[in-house]
Image (spheres, helix red, strand yellow):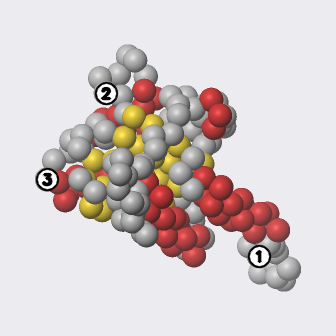
Amino acid sequence: MSDAELPEKTPSHPPAGEEPPLIDLHSDAYFMGEALRQALRAYAAEEVPVGAVITHKGRIIARAFNQVETLKDATAHAEMLAITQAESVMGDWRLNECELYVTKEPCPMCAGAIVHVRFSRIIFGCGDPKGGGAGGLFNIVQHPSLNHRCEITHGVRGEECRNLLRSFFLERRTRPAAGEGKPPLFP
């Protein structure tokens, strides 16, 4: 499913008659910026640059970035690591009053965890039509047969999120492979 086919974005506007603040510290764009900061940490660690933050009543309670290579753990996605932190902060595995901000559409594994912890809403930057679990390839988080469904807001700072991923993979494709250009250990 393309971004155009995903459910409509939920706007974040001030109440009627109020001026928007110069910097809205409770906007989707602000929290996605915090997720992007986490994604940059992943990039610096040579991990796929995906970052996530979890909020509870407008306050960040968890932050994480992909650490699959660092931890040698296929489940160490930003969303999964942030969920574990948030559960610890909340003292419960149910995160139904929380929102997840993530720079890339969650994969099916993460989407399954999102359903289990019962997030009220997930917000992601760029979609993943080839492997997304929140409307891209599948829509696990809103599947009618499951016990919980999340509201989805997509495309928040999407171009920035997409460009970061593109830059990372372009750099990976153009740099020499490990060991390339070095003499063999055993001639």
Nearer the N terminus, badge 3 or badge 1?
Answer: 3
Answer whether labels 3 and 2 touch (C-beta < 8 Å): no
Q: Position of residue 54 (x, y in %)?
A: 34, 55
Residue at which label 1 appears:
179
Q: Residue furthest left?
A: 91
Residue at which label 3 appears:
91
Residue 97 found in image quarter: top left
Foreground residue among 29 and 32: 29
**Crowd around label 3: few <14 · some 14–19 · many ≥20 (10 Å):** few
- Give the CA distance from mark 3 to mark 2: 20 Å
Q: Is 4 left or right of 184, judged from the image as shown?
A: left
- Give the CA distance from mark 3 to mark 1: 46 Å
Foreground residue among 133 and 120: 120
Foreground residue among 181 and 20: 20
Residue 31 found in image quarter: bottom left
The residue at 75%/68% (across/down) is 171
The residue at 41%/60% (across/down) is 20
The residue at 35%/22% (across/down) is 146
Q: Is 174 left or right of 145, judged from the image as shown?
A: right
Q: Give the number of the mark in front: 3 or 2.
A: 2
Q: Residue furthest top?
A: 145
Residue 148 in view here: yes
Residue at which label 2 appears:
148
**Circle 3: residue type:** Gly
